[in-house]
Each structure stands twice: as structure tokens, then as C-alpha cells.
Image (tube, rainbow, N blue to C red):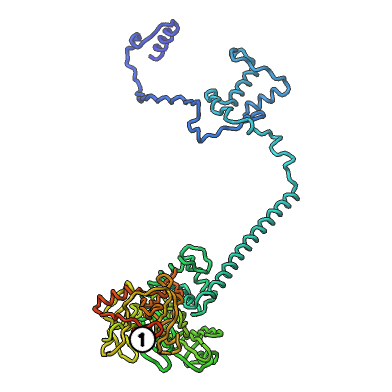
């Protein structure tokens, strides 16, 4: 069967005629093997590569620099073979583009194929790297890249480097010298500014710095430590650290110290037992008493003690050694100067500071003791208290701004025979007791804050001589009648007179302390007004010399009339001062 079919197929093929399965008469079925079905799915054609006349990201593609020489092409095997075959033969002209490749020789075909493989594709246009974007000036020939004239010998390079380093060193030394000169100038200005400042102001600055915690040195000694504290405070203000406080900086320091000072009840007082002046934290030491040689202030449980002392006959160096040898006392720091000393350390379970000042053979001082458990509060307060201590305050100087003396002396004018007195308002406010020597206690019954006037009533007094307050004064020549402060006139209680001259609302020269409230009369003996001593506040709360003003007679008369006082109409003769002197007396305000 198989042979018969093969013969038939051979005949068909030999005849060149088409054949099909129907034309073949096969009597028997042929077994056909099953062929697995193959499914052909169409594969998507890849998109043709796109070409762009300009780069996609023009900002990110930098133009290539133009090549001045021949461009080096990448090496390939075909190119190497072509190069070997053409080394000895002369170079043939490249075929024209119109000639078909089939007509070219094999060597030319190989060269063309090689150039095609090495050359960039025709799809990339030449506009990708425009020649106009690269100026010819930027193209530097290889020979001109490093001119021989610019080549500096190594020795010259070393000289140049050495000269540069020397110049840098010189500039650095100059800057350091200027900085050192600035520091020296700052220190010199600070050293020259503070000695000319009043002692009360120096101590006030140091106390404020101590209350703020910027100063922790020896109290009362305005040395380099205090200047460093001033510079630290100036740096807190982001100002130049000169060591000398300008007026706005002094204002800022006083304002910053108000908070800590108010928290402890800080107040400057005059100690009547010793005559010294000191700063006292009244909220921490509310209990007061007297000691054998001074005054004492203590806390409720005795953890804090502040005590003043006074020795009329003592040698400062000997007392300095005796204080250091006190029983159970361990000294950690001590400074002895010409007129003062400071000692600090530990005594039993308490810290202590002793500060003393001498004037001749008299020594006045203060001792501060506080438990170590209270060191967090008392460390700065103790330094401020010892720093503000003045053993011998200037009797002629006005009290510091905001300061209330424990005992203040002033002058009062008798305005009625029944015991009514005219006195200055500030000198008689916040008094626990008002005393008129030889006549008893008085009571403040009315005040005029605008003109600094106060009306006192002296109970039980009779036959007083009132001053003649009526009449209009003329001229600028005045005579002031008053009683000076005991420290200003060596304890004398007599009425004294001082010649003065009216200068606007003020009086020149300024009378001594205690004359606040004195009577001012003109050349004809007519009442011109009441003297009012004030302590003006300069920038930063700095005290200046006291100023004297005259409260006009019209303001005095208006105030007294409003209080129901009948004024005297007569006037004392200008040549006879006895009458006006009988109408003037000392008044004492005793505060807590």
C-alpha cells in the first residue's frame, strides 16, 4: 500500500499538476497521529525610535566643546582590519552617494561599512550641538593652555607662599594688637570712671549686680570682679562690653534688680545705734532689737542674723586679726585694705560675712550669718547687704532715691498758737512716731502731695509763736531759717540762718540737710515760702546733689486756709530775726 501511494505522488509531482486528497483514491483509511495545536498570537511592533531636533532637557545638557584636532573614533575589529589592509596602499577616494554598493570594490565596501559603524547615526541632527553656542574665544589650543611664561619656578612659589603667610601673620598680630588695645582702653576707661563716682552710687551698682547674681566677689570692693560683672550684664543686653554702664544700661540694671529686691523686701536704712547705713532684707529679718554694740535683725527662727557694731577706740588691723580668730570660725577669704576689711567663711553650720570701715580710731561694721540651708536665697542677698554697707555715710549728701531713713530730721514752721505746724510732706510720711524735741509727739493730719506740704498737730502745746505768713514778698534775696541735721551741725539743736538767692523756682546755694521745711523770708522780712529739699533721680536712679526749691507763699496759704488755719497778718522786722526764729523748730520722724 505504501509503495502504491508513493508511485502516485511521484507521478503527480513529475507531471507538475496539483494534487489533493480527494483526487487520491485511497481505499483504506490512513491512521493520522494527533498534532498539538499551536496558537500564534500577534506580537505588537516596537515603535520606531523618535528623534528630536533639540535635546529634551536643554538646561541639563551642556554643549560639548568644539574639537580642534581630529576626532578619535572608537576602535573596532573591522576598522583594525581595514587599517591593516590600507597601510601600504594609497588612500582611495570615497565613493559617491549615487553609486550603488554592488558596483563598488570589496575594499571600498568594507571601508564604507566601517565608516558607517564608526560614524554617528543619521537620525541625530547636527543641531544638537550648535557651533554658535560655543564661542571661538573659549577654544584654547593645546599649545596655549599653559604658556611657558606663566610657569613659576618652585623657589618663587615658595617665596610667594612665605610672603603670603608673613602678611597673614602680620594682619593677625595687628588685629590681636587692636583687640588688646581695645581691651586695655576699656579697662582703662572703667578704671578711670568708677573712682570719680560717688561711693553710694558704686555700692548701689554692686548691690544690684549681687542681687541679680552677676557679682560674687568681695563686697564693697569695686575691683576687676565688679567690672567683669558689669561686662557680663552688658552682654546680657547684647551691648558692647565696656565695663562702664551708660545711662540706659544703668536704667536697665536698676529695673532688673527691682524684682529680686522686692522679693526680699530690700531697703536702705540708717542705723540709729551706730550711725551706719546698710541695705536690709526686711522680709527675711522682720525681728529687730539692740545689741551690746549696735543693732540686730533676725529671722523668725534665727536662721538669718544681721548685726551692726561700733567701736570708738579700735585699730582696724588688730580687729581684722581678732575677727579671723573667732571661735568655731573657718575663714575662706579675707581682704584688708587701708580703711576697710572683708572676711567670709563658715562658722559652725552657718556662712558668715564681716565687713568693717574705719575713720580715725572709730570702726563700724556689720556681721551677716545665715544657715547653709538658706544659701540658695541668702548668698546673693548677703553679698548685697555687705556691699551696700556704709560705716560713715556723707551727712551732707541727700538720701538715695527711694530710701527711707529710719530717723529723719526736718524743720517745721509754727502756723497757729494752738500747736499747728507746717512741715515738708516727704520728710514726715510713713513715720511711726513724729517728735518735736521739748514739746512731745505730733500727729500728721493733712497733706498736699503736689506741693510737698504736710500739716502736723502738736497736742498739749500752748503759747507757741506763729510765723507771719501774710503779705507779698519781693526780690530774689532770701534768708533761710531752719534747724540742720545733727550730723550736719555736730549735734547742735539751735535755729540757724543762711543767706540764699532765688533762682527761678530753686534756691542757691543749697542748704544743708535738715533745712527741708525751713522758712524763707525776703529782705523786708516777708514770708516768701517754705524750703523743700529734694533728691532728684538721674538716669538709672543715680543720686545727684540735693536740690532746694521754694514752695510759693500763695500755695502755702491756700493749703492752710483749706485746713481752717487762721493766718497771722503781721511781719517781723527785717533786722530782727528773733521773732521768726521762735516760729521755727526741729521735727523728727522715727520710722519702723
Front position in the image: 116 or 55: 55
Q: Can you say whether 176 is above or below 92 in the image?
A: below
Q: Residue at x 59, y 67 (%)?
A: 185
**Residue 544 in view here:** yes
On the image, the x and y values in percent for residue 145 come to: 69, 37
Quadrant where the image shows the N terminus: top left
Q: Give the residue furthest to the left.
A: 564
Question: Dot 1: what SS?
Answer: helix
Q: What residue is rendered at 58% in x and 32% in y?
A: 64
Q: Is residue 66 above or below residue 533?
A: above
- The residue labelled by disc 1 is 579
Q: Is residue 410 left or right of residue 234?
A: left
Could you say where residue 549 lies in the image, as x and y percent from the top left? 40, 74
Q: How many marks on residues?
A: 1
- The image quadrant that residue 142 belongs to is top right
> How busy is the neighbourhood of tag 1: few (under 14 within 10 Å), some, or many (20 plus)?
some
Identify the residue at horizontal 41%, vertical 75% (top origin).
Answer: 548
Q: Depth check: 14 or 515 in front?
A: 515
> Where residue 287 appears, x then y in whole percent?
34, 86
* Residue 463, quarter of the rendered image: bottom left
Q: Quadrant of the C terminus?
A: bottom left
The answer to whether residue 345 shows anywhere in this view is: no
- Residue 36 located left or right of residue 321: left
13 or 402, nearer to the observer: 402
In x, y percent, where is residue 591?
A: 34, 84
Amino acid at each position: 500500500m505504501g509503495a502504491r501511494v508513493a508511485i502516485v505522488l511521484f507521478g503527480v509531482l513529475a507531471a507538475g499538476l496539483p494534487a489533493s486528497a480527494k483526487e487520491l483514491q485511497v481505499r483504506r483509511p490512513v491512521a493520522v497521529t494527533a498534532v498539538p495545536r499551536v496558537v500564534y498570537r500577534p506580537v505588537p511592533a516596537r515603535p520606531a525610535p523618535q528623534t528630536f531636533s533639540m535635546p529634551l532637557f536643554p538646561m541639563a545638557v551642556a554643549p560639548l566643546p568644539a574639537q580642534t584636532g581630529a576626532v578619535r573614533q572608537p576602535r573596532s575589529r573591522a576598522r583594525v582590519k581595514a587599517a591593516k589592509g590600507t597601510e601600504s596602499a594609497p588612500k582611495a577616494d570615497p565613493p559617491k552617494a549615487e553609486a550603488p554598493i554592488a558596483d563598488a570594490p570589496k575594499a571600498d565596501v568594507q571601508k564604507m561599512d566601517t565608516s558607517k559603524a564608526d560614524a554617528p547615526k543619521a537620525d541625530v541632527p547636527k543641531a544638537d550641538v550648535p557651533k554658535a553656542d560655543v564661542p571661538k574665544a573659549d577654544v584654547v589650543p593645546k599649545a596655549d593652555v599653559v604658556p611657558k611664561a606663566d610657569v613659576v619656578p618652585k623657589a618663587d612659589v615658595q617665596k610667594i607662599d612665605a610672603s603670603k603667610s608673613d602678611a597673614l601673620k602680620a594682619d593677625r598680630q595687628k588685629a590681636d594688637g587692636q583687640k588688646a588695645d581695645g581691651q586695655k582702653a576699656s579697662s582703662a576707661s572703667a578704671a578711670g570712671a568708677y573712682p570719680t563716682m560717688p561711693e553710694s552710687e558704686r555700692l548701689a551698682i554692686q548691690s544690684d549686680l549681687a542681687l541679680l547674681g552677676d557679682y560674687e566677689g568681695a563686697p564693697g570692693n569695686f575691683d576687676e570682679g565688679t567690672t567683669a560683672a558689669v561686662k557680663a550684664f552688658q552682654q546680657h543686653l547684647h551691648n558692647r562690653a565696656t565695663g562702664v554702664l551708660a545711662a540706659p544700661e544703668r536704667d536697665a540694671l536698676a529695673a532688673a534688680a527691682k524684682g529680686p529686691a522686692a522679693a526680699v523686701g530690700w531697703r536702705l536704712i540708717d542705723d540709729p545705734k551706730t550711725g551706719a547705713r546698710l541695705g536690709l532684707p526686711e522680709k527675711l529679718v522682720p525681728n529687730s532689737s539692740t545689741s551690746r554694740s549696735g543693732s540686730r535683725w533676725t529671722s523668725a527662727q534665727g536662721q538669718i542674723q544681721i548685726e551692726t557694731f561700733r567701736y570708738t577706740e579700735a585699730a582696724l588691723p588688730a580687729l581684722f586679726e581678732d575677727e579671723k580668730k573667732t571661735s568655731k570660725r573657718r575663714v575662706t577669704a579675707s581682704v584688708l585694705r587701708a580703711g576697710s576689711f572683708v572676711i567670709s567663711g563658715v562658722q559652725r553650720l552657718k556662712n558668715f560675712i564681716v565687713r568693717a570701715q574705719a575713720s580715725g580710731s572709730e570702726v563700724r561694721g556689720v556681721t551677716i550669718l545665715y544657715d547653709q540651708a538658706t544659701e540658695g536665697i541668702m548668698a546673693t542677698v548677703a553679698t548685697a547687704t555687705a556691699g551696700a554697707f556704709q560705716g560713715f555715710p556723707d551727712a551732707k549728701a541727700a538720701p538715695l532715691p527711694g530710701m527711707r531713713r529710719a530717723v529723719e530730721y526736718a524743720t517745721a514752721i509754727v502756723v497757729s498758737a494752738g500747736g499747728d505746724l507746717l512741715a515738708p510732706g516727704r520728710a514726715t510720711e510713713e513715720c511711726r512716731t513724729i517728735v518735736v524735741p521739748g514739746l512731745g509727739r505730733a500727729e500728721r493730719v493733712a497733706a498736699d502731695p503736689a506741693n510737698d506740704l504736710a500739716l502736723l498737730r502738736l497736742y498739749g502745746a500752748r503759747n507757741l509763736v506763729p510765723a507771719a505768713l501774710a503779705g507779698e514778698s519781693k526780690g530774689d534775696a532770701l534768708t533761710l531759717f531752719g534747724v540742720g541735721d545733727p550730723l550736719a551741725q555736730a549735734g547742735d539743736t539751735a535755729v540757724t540762718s543762711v543767706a540764699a538767692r532765688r533762682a527761678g523756682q530753686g534756691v542757691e546755694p543749697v542748704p544743708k540737710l535738715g533745712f527741708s521745711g525751713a522758712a524763707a523770708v525776703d529782705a523786708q522780712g516777708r514770708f516768701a515760702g517754705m524750703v523743700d529739699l529734694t533728691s532728684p533721680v538721674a538716669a538709672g536712679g543715680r543720686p545727684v546733689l540735693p536740690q532746694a526749691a521754694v514752695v510759693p507763699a500763695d500755695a502755702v496759704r491756700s493749703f492752710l486756709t483749706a485746713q481752717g488755719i487762721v493766718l497771722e497778718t503781721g511781719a517781723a522786722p527785717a533786722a530782727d530775726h528773733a521773732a521768726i526764729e521762735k516760729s521755727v523748730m526741729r521735727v523728727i520722724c522715727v520710722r519702723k
